[in-house]
Image: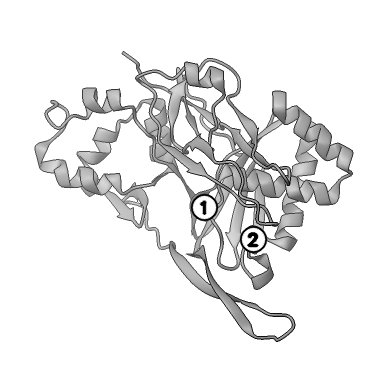
Amino acid sequence: MLVYIKPLSIFPELHSDTIFGAILSAISELYPPEKVEDLLLKFKDNPPFLVSSSFPYVSNGKEKIRFFPKIIESKKESSDKNDLTGNDFHDENLDSKKKYKKVDFIEENLFFKLSSGDMKELDIINNLKDYTIKSNLLFKKTLDIKGKHKKTITPNNTINRITLESEAIFYSEGFEFTDMGLFFLVDFREKEYEDMVCSAIKFLKDRGFGRDISIGKGHFDYEIDDDYRLVENKGNYFITLSRFIPNTEDLSKINEYSGYEIDSKRGKSSGGELRKQVRFFKEGSTFASYKEFYGQIVESGKDSPAIEYGYAFPMNYNKEDD
């Protein structure tokens, strides 16, 4: 299932952990506590559905042009195939390589060609004149894309309810979208949860995404495409389309051909409790395939129970590891 999000106000970043947390919170509002407890128990052993992070799409008339994260190559691949002294790299394209490093998202058709092995990053770098880089998006020059988005920082203040005077000033970040939006994917391994998730998304439409909904941020319309499918590559590796918190077994399978970037987060409860720091692999990271699903959920709260969603959303990646 693919969910299109059309922001109606300043909108937060939506990674897989944020999306899952919002869906779980909405489910807890809509269903009895035992339903939520049963769902969480399943996620500890065998997740009934997987959630990707959100990625941008551009509205071009009636067409929606989707973008996916840039694939993160291993250092071994980079040294073998992408070295500046290698035969495949053109010296005159050093500037193109620098420009390509600034790209975060690649148009869907190009992404699928890269993931299937029909195209290499070097093909893009050596022919960058045939492509457009707009903000952090890369696409073929033949596409006429006018959509845009920008990051914005907004000052806010708290009001003393007794004196009605302004007190602390704080700043919140978000994105403004023009002819653009976000989409994310949900892979249902147990179909019985599809109605539950759809109800949660409908609930979130009325409430909004993020912590700043009370000041008019995070509101959206949405559209669901049940027919969308990712391409089926014959891959011996996978690309994660979500933030991925590996378990001990996952860590033991990482090899020199795995490509990844690591980031971390440390949330805070509504009561101000600083939660446990959690490290994860970023979207676009690549690893050897060896089982059905990867990752885990992690308990991060003490005084107030909390979990961090960290299951990979795997897409087959066809590459050689020799």
Q: Measure how far apart labels 1 and 2 are at the Cα level.
A: 28 Å
- Give amino acid for label 1: Lys
Disc 2 is placed on an element classified as loop
Most foreground residue, 253 or 82: 253
Place residue 209 in its image quadrant.
bottom right
Q: Is residue 284 left or right of residue 160?
A: left
Q: Which mark is residue 64?
A: 1
Q: Which mark is residue 211?
A: 2
Which x, y percent locates residue 74?
Answer: 33, 27
User: For mark 2, does the 10 Å Cα neighbourhood hold few (<14), some (14 to 19), or many (20 or more) residues?
Assistant: few
Q: Which mark is residue 164?
A: none
Which x, y percent locates residue 204?
Answer: 72, 56
Q: Residue at x 51, y 53 (%)?
A: 63
Which x, y percent locates residue 144?
Answer: 37, 58
Q: Say if residue 190 shows up in the picture.
A: no
Determine whether 27 is above or below 207 in the image: above
Furthest toward the top, the residue is 322
- Give amino acid for label 2: Arg
Determine whether 37 is above or below 77 in the image: below
Disc 1 versus disc 2: nearer the observer: 2
Q: Say if residue 290 shows up in the picture.
A: yes
**Of marks 1 and 2, which one's residue comes earlier in the chain?**
1
Disc 1 is placed on an element classified as strand
Quadrant that contains the N terminus: top right
User: For mark 1, does the 10 Å Cα neighbourhood hold few (<14), some (14 to 19), or many (20 or more) residues?
Assistant: some
Q: Which residue is drawn at 72% across and 51% down?
A: 201
